[in-house]
Image (spheres, helix red, strand yellow):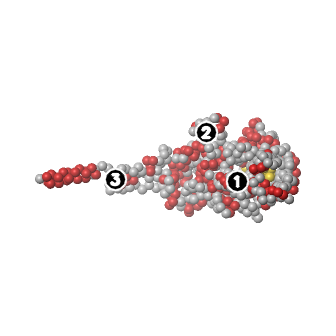
Amino acid sequence: MAPLEPWEKVLVDGKNFTTTVHGIFSCTSCHGGVQSGDKDSAHSGLIENPSEGPEVVCAQCHPDVAHVFENSLHATLGGYWTALEARSVPENHAALGAMFGNHCSSCHTTCGDCHVGQPSGVGGGLFNGHIFEKTPPMTRSCTACHGSRVGNEYLGKHEGIPGDVHFREGRMNCIDCHSGFELHGQPSDCAACHSGPESAQLPPPGHRYSGVQTPRCESCHFTVTTAQDDIDMHLVHGADLSCQVCHSITYTSCDGCHVAVSENTGKPYFETEASYLTFLIGKNIRKSYDRPYGFVPVRHVPISPASYSYYGENLLSNFDSLSTWTYATPHNVQLNTPQNASCSACHGNGSIFLTADKVAPEELNANRGVIVDVVPAALPDLLQAPAMPADHNGRSVCLVCHEKGAMGPSNPPDHARYQDSICRNCHILP
Amino acid sequence: MMRKMTLLALLCMALLLLAGCAGGELPQVAPASEDAPPGLSSRAEISPAAEAEDLASAQPEETVDYCLECHTDKDRLIDTARPEEEVISESKGEG
């Protein structure tokens, strides 16, 4: 995204902004400073970003949102610290804190960073003459920061790889799935409003994949979960595979990010060893009630034991405590993909799975929970299912006899979810 | 006689009804500045109701919003902009 000119960043739409509800207030009410025709005098005590800091101006009119936003991941950047703390020891947290302040904290987002102007991490500047946008412009807000992976994948910026169908066909932006309710966060103390057992209290998220899964594909595509969409594979694999296993395509992985402060300019910088496109299925290391899948797409994150060596030696002494191939939800969903073209795309096809040979030797231990040890059986092996007797020709009701073994061989336990319509996929008439 | 009494009674009732409609002040619509949360001041210095009352007797004072005067003027922003520091990013690869 091209940076704004200095004047563009602060040009106010005097005609339209002053007629909005926020335009009623004097500039100095939020921004401080002094009413003066001299720039330096006017800017004395200026608060560039009134939505930053311990006393957020926005809270005076939006107390419900401001109160909970301080717990959101955009504000806390809790996901970073969850990973840093897991991979390090407390003795190294001071050094990691210095690193974090130089290289990570710029991702911290305020109300204004979404609703008034571009995030400060990408140079800042007003969106639209200081008019507040209830729904931020996607490419100047969301993908301005979430660009190299989510933005490029969703918008189809990789040559030869289509963008997400929700964008291409649905013309949906980020907010259509990631609601303001989700992004604004949740209160830290559920008990303040809700009664119930302490065990039911949900702490603020420490990672984007913690807690209740939101958004969920099933929220709109609910027929997938109710067996009303005539897609047999949704019944067969619905709980075993995340949606993206079958409906995502090639996405970005990265290797080896190292950070430092330039000796020439004194400014922080980073270097990533490599970025490449892959599609690999790994085991779900975040298996839970909300994410019950056995297999998910996995993405390599550019962390290495020496990523923060500028700030100290061996700062990530527990490096292997987290995998480097991580649970991923690529934002490039398609209806038809190579994976769902046929069963053989996955069954017996080791190339599509994160097997040990694809993992760097020094990262094998870290990824032991993600590596697929046994590739799902090839179709011929799978289809060693007993053939249907010839006298069953024309019969379509299988479970009456076979579900509990009332009048024939009983279904094995892994057939519990299967319905009559899919029996013939494997049990073929002679 | 009876008819005259009836007419007189009707006239008195009509007068009473009309008297009930007269008088009293119109409800004042609170100006926006009175609803502003504490700490935030309105761009208007006087309320619309007060302004209407004083219109005939006083010249309304023109207030200059220096912030908007500058920040709505593209040329002035260009002229007064701080020289932009050339940023040479040494970062390499995807961020």
Please tell me which residue is depicted at 76% across the width and 60% down the height of the picture: A337
Describe residue A236's horizontal placement relative to residue B21 as left or right.
Answer: right
Q: Chain of mark 2?
A: A
Give the residue type at disc 1: Ala
Q: Mark 3: which secondary structure?
A: helix
Q: Mark 1: which secondary structure?
A: loop
Please tell me which residue is depicted at 77% across the width and 57% down the height of the picture: A395
The numbered dot on residue A227 is: 1
Q: CA distance from mark 1 to mark 3?
A: 71 Å
Name the residue furthest bottom: A160
Q: Are marks 1 and 3 in contact (CB under 8 Å)?
A: no
Coordinates of residue A23 in the picture (x, y in percent): 50, 54
Give the residue type at disc 2: Cys
User: Which residue bears the numbered disc 3?
Assistant: B53
Quadrant in the picture for the N terminus of chain A: bottom right
Of A229 and A242, the residue lying toward us = A229
Describe residue B76's horizontal placement relative to residue A252 as left or right.
Answer: left
Q: Nearer the viewer, mark 1 or mark 3?
A: 1
Q: Is residue A372 at least partly visible in the picture?
A: yes
The numbered dot on residue A190 is: 2
Q: Are marks 1 and 3 on the same chain?
A: no
Q: Chain of mark 1?
A: A
